[in-house]
Image (tube, helix red, strand yellow):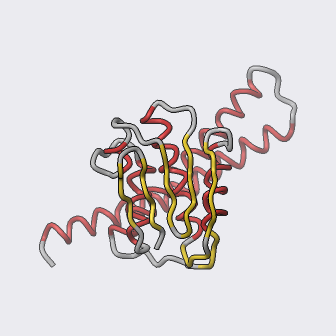
């Protein structure tokens, strides 16, 4: 193994370790924020602020999970827990994460063996990226068996979705995770085809 590969693996393990260590204090913040919210004794604007803290802490948790997954894959330590899932249900789960009014799902699914959690997060991250970097209000996910077609993809979102421009952690890790499971991403015009392995 050359020195660059060793350093990359070492850095990926360092990132993975940092993600692990961040989970405990983050869980404490989320737990106490939810406890304060459930008690209902806070007056405004304190109640609103605690709600914002809880939402931001959960978002941080999701970012830590994405970073951890990417680091495990890059370090060669990703062992996907595969189970059977229907691709239409995976697309619907991703749409629920973002809001079904923002992601229109259609088509017919197929049964595949996949790391369900990583795949759902990946599909949601790609849809979120298309929305955010494309300046769109809604995208569509057309399910065609083991592949999903995400559209429209704008000129500004395409390089981010494909990982050519690293401006979106979720999309970058999504591409890595999909490829690590034998899938692929391919752009044709305004449609990103996500082949799930």
Q: Quadrant of the N terminus?
A: bottom left
Up/down of 101 relative to 24, above or below: above
Where in the figure is residue 68, as x and y percent of width and height?
45, 61
Q: Left or right: where does residue 61 sit relative to residue 126? A: right
Where in the figure is residue 89, as x and y percent of width and height?
67, 63
Q: Left or right: where does residue 95 sit relative to residue 194? A: right
Foreground of the two, 126 or 8: 126
Outermost residue, top side: 45
Up/down of 75 relative to 173, above or below: below
Q: Left or right: where does residue 116 sit relative to residue 163? A: right
Foreground of the two, 150 or 59: 150
Up/down of 135 relative to 189, above or below: above
Foreground of the two, 147 or 181: 147
Outermost residue, left side: 2
Where in the figure is residue 154, as x and y percent of width and height?
39, 37
Residue name at image x 61 percent, y 54 percent: 94
Residue name at image x 43 percent, y 73 percent: 181
* Circle count: 0
Residue name at image x 66 percent, y 56 percent: 92
Residue name at image x 61 percent, y 72 percent: 110
Foreground of the two, 171 or 131: 131
Up/down of 117 relative to 138, above or below: below
Where in the figure is residue 180, as x and y percent of width and height?
39, 71
């Amino acid at each position: 193994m050359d020195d660059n590969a060793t350093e990359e693996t070492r850095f990926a393990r360092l990132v993975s370790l940092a993600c692990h260590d961040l989970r405990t204090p983050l869980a404490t913040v989320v737990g106490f924020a939810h406890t304060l919210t459930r008690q209902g004794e806070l007056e405004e604007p304190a109640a609103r602020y605690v709600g914002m803290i809880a939402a931001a802490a959960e978002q941080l948790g999701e970012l830590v999970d994405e970073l951890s997954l990417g680091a495990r894959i890059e370090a060669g330590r990703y062992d996907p827990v595969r189970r059977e899932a229907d691709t239409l249900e995976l697309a619907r789960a991703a749409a629920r994460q973002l809001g079904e009014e923002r992601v229109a799902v259609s088509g017919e699914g197929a049964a595949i063996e996949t790391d369900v959690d990583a795949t759902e997060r990946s599909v949601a991250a790609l849809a979120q990226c298309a929305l955010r970097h494309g300046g769109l209000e809604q995208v569509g996910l057309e399910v065609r068996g083991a592949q999903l077609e995400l559209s429209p993809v704008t000129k500004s979102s395409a390089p981010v979705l494909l990982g050519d421009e690293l401006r979106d952690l979720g999309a970058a890790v999504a591409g890595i995770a999909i490829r690590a499971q034998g899938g692929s991403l391919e752009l044709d015009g305004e449609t990103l085809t996500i082949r799930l392995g």
